[in-house]
Amino acid sequence: MRPRRTQLVLCAFAASLVVTGCSAGDKPEADSAGTTASAATYSPADVASATGTYKVKPLFAVPKTLPKKYRFAFLNPGLSYPYFATWSDGMKDAAKFYGVDLDQADLNFKYDTQLDQYKQLAVKMPDVVGSQPMNDATYNQAKQDDVKLVMIDGSFKDVPTFGVDDQQVGTLAVDTMADAAKAKISGAWKGKKVLVAGLTSPNCGPCDARVKAAFTRAESALGIPAANTTMLTPQGQDPTSSAGSTFNDFLTAHPDNAVLIVSYGDEPVVGAINAAKAANRDGDILAVSNGGDSAARLALRDQSNAGILVGAIDYQPYAEGWNWVEAAIATAMGKPFDKFTVGRVLTAANVDQFYPEDKTK
């Protein structure tokens, strides 16, 4: 068990950490019995108003007066990746809104450093630590430290988790492109062999699951057999350029085929589209990305992608980040939290409606 902690506000910390919530909280703390002065909670309308155009739907009704001043920590996979950077933005804003302290570490996709980064965060004695992914060493150390864990977009042993449903979003990607694919197959691609290329990431179970779900749906909805599906695993830390290189090789190996492109995220799809354009094969592809981060939104606004990038499944990464803080509060309080749901698809026609703030950045 951990020793009884003192709630200190320490703004100077390891250089690898992004620290937020370092000012004294403005919310009254509970009495020594751990009861709150009021049962009032933040309503969905309160959260929607606080999150502006993101209009986040809360996963947990956070009390306006928390039992104590909580401190949370999150091991971010890589802040250079737009999707994960948006998680961070949502987490920081939620921490400020709910009056909790938040420390973040940037793994920079060096997952073998997760335990060391965790140990740096653990110095400040967080109530809850989050990550995506998790490994045995970090899990065991957290259990030894009596630290609660909450994962996002992944699962590990008995760790509570929330995030996208891998099967659902993989299926939705194919459903989104189904009409366009059928039109191509009966028109411009008539007589061509149609393949499905799924771009995944090394050692990423959720990534593989999304792609495999897309393959299954392509067979049932479009009649594309499993033999015509290929899982591609680009190597390298830059998912856009590495996917571009991998997909270029794939196109070279299949000069006479049409290809439907699916992936776990947005950047790999953007890289594949760029490769197809460079090879003058843009007429042979259709794509849907998963994530809805800034890279996908920029690609949807690019008129040269019209008729190629059908849409992007919007995971609403800002909302996921915000909701993680809510899930952490719920976990710290020993309460359940709701499931995160995905159902919005971004297209060239609606991307400005859902993300008008992009135009001001």
Image: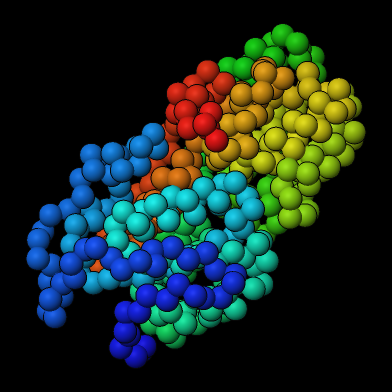
> In the picture, residue 69 is in which quadrant?
bottom left
Give the percent coordinates (x, y) of residue 177.
59, 24
The residue furthest top is 187
Q: Say which residue appears at 78% left-offset and 47% top-offset.
A: 242
Q: Identify which residue, 336 or 100, lies in the foreground.
A: 100
Give the percent coordinates (x, y) of residue 185.
70, 15
Q: Say which residue appears at 68% left-offset and 52% top-offset.
A: 201
> In the picture, residue 336 is in which quadrant?
bottom left
Q: Is residue 49 above or below residue 336?
A: above
Side (left or right) of 178 relative to 41: right
Q: Is residue 338 above or below residue 270?
A: below
Q: Say which residue appears at 9% left-offset and 61% top-offset.
A: 38
Give the percent coordinates (x, y) of residue 116.
60, 78
Quadrant of image for the C terminus: top right
Quadrant of image for the N terminus: bottom left
Give the percent coordinates (x, y) of residue 13.
51, 75
Q: Identify which residue, 345 or 167, lies in the foreground.
A: 345
Q: Say which residue appears at 18% left-offset and 62% top-offset.
A: 65
> In the picture, residue 23 is in which quadrant?
bottom left
Q: Is residue 194 above or below residue 270?
A: above
Residue 291 at least partly seen: yes
Q: Identify which residue, 265 or 257, lies in the foreground.
A: 265
Side (left or right) of 41 relative to 198: left
